[in-house]
Image: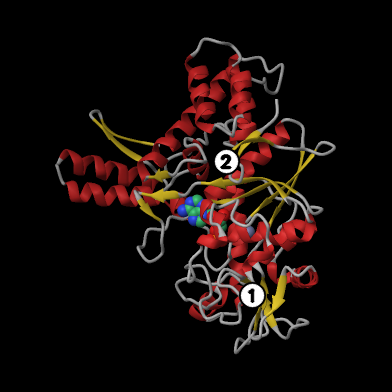
Amino acid sequence: MTLRLYDTKSRQLKEVASHNGATSMYCCGPTVYRDAHVGNLRTFLLADLISRALTLSGIDVSLVQNITDVGHMSEDFQEDDKILTQAHIEKIDPYEIARKYEENFHKDLSRLNIRKAMVYPKASESIEMMLSMISELIDKKAAYVGNDGSVYFDAHSSQGYGELSGNRLDALKPGHKHEVSEDTAKRFHADWALWKAAGNRTQMIWPSPWGSGFPGWHIECSAMSMELLNSHVDVHVGGIDLRFPHHENERAQSNAITGEESVDVWVHGEHLLFEGRKMSKSSGNVLLLQDVIDRGFDPLALRLCLLENRYRSQMDLTWKSIEAAHELLLRWRGKMSEWAENEPSVKPWEADPEIESAINNDIDTPKILLRLRGIEKSEQGNKRALFLYADQILGLNLDAGIEEKVLTAKMKELLDARSLARSEKRWADSDDLRVQLEGLGLMIKDTPEGQTWN
Ligand code: AMP
Ligand code: ZN
């Protein structure tokens, strides 16, 4: 059975191609000026799910994920590079900022069981690659040097511009929020910078045939994907916000270089909201994986929680849903240990047609979880083998068993104190003690029979 994914460009399900048993994938990576929030992680998880699905069907996956450490201009700060702005705020070198958040990014991926990409190229170390692509675009008359020393892509040179996002050039108004407004050097308002002249910027700049400067954000992904994946991407992944202008522009650039459709399937993950609101720094509503762990939840509870929703639907993450996922994770791990005692492990896992069809039908994770709930309740004797099959996609370490944690004296003392506070109806004290217990990694639940913990 072949994996089919929803392709944003053709607006239909498309079979994922493989060539001699291998598929090339590119996933837009993080801009490393801050920690990735759980929304970013949802999109990175999507690439992992696709890659796991292909691997499970015996296909070799070459996944490239870039690290944007230069060139991503901030909308809030208009002309500033996100990394340089953050370096200024934290008063440290921009490269130090980038390396710090890049390290955190890798840590988060590993805690979420997201398998490693083949390579994580950094923009700042791929300047040569970008310069040679920009020169080629100029030679092909798809780009021109502006009178400000910057190089611009000529949007009109791109035949199918707009097919990905639906934003046709003749309908695009000047001053779209992603555009750099002062570019009077551009021939047309929807042209974009491939190379920006340094102006009075002194950090993160490089020499080029057009003077010193730095690369634009869109050219980074074209250069890395075309260079590192042999001029063709079978599956390209990113969040829905990147569809325009980032991916539309990337497609125009890459197609101009290859003279053909450079990406086969464009996959976009919908956004994650947190407690009903868009995650944004300004509204103080950004959730990190570390925050989830600090509340005592298994990081894979977040993974499970995200899997409860189809990647193409907007999802509202809540503390309640994370807690429910944590409990389900523990229950399933407990069941797996129980089943291990009764189920002779003839096979490490056993394929299930329903699960296989859900995977291959556009990664329908809610359906896989529903199937597992059904198997759990059933009387069949191969539950563990089927769960192990599904876990190759789900990546929940369902076979991890439950870590038996003995209560420390401090935990015991606080639990007793809370029990007493509740019996004496001292609710504020009880809440206070709950916070302290949660800080120690315990999850407290109040039931009619009294408090319980795990
Ligand atoms: P950035 O680090 O901002 O460049 O974003 C990294 C990835 O996360 C991109 O693919 C974005 O489209 C994606 N992304 C950003 N915000 C969200 C969100 N709230 N939910 C899901 N994905 C997101
Ligand atoms: Zn990108």
Q: Residue at x 45, y 31 (%)?
A: 328
Tell me the amino acid under the disc marked 2.
Answer: Arg
Residue situated furthest left in the rendering: 425
How far apart, in angstroms, are the residues tagged by discs 1 and 2? Answer: 40 Å
Q: What crowding class fits label 2: few (fewer than 14 Cα within 10 Å), some (14-19), or many (20 or more)?
A: few
Label 2: element kind: loop
Above or below, 137 against 440 in this view is below
Q: Is the C terminus in the top left, top right, bottom left or bottom right quadrant?
A: top left
For label 1, being within 8 Å of ligand 1 is answered no
The answer to whether residue 446 is left or right of residue 99 is left
Q: Residue at x 70, y 29 (%)?
A: 2
- Position of residue 187 measured from the top left corner of the image (x, y, whole percent): 61, 76
Q: Of the residues tagged 1 and 2, which is closer to the observer?
A: 2
Mark 1 in CB contact with mark 2 (< 8 angstroms): no
Q: Residue at x 30, y 47 (%)?
A: 434
Q: Which residue is mark 1?
A: 95
Q: Which residue is mark 2?
A: 11
- Position of residue 325 measured from the top left corner of the image (x, y, whole percent): 44, 36
Residue situated furthest bottom in the rendering: 200
- Position of residue 107 measured from the top left corner of the image (x, y, whole percent): 60, 55
Q: Residue at x 59, y 11 (%)?
A: 381
Q: Nearer the viewer, residue 185 or 434?
A: 185
Does the rendering let one see residue 29?
no
- Position of residue 7 measured from the top left corner of the image (x, y, whole percent): 61, 42
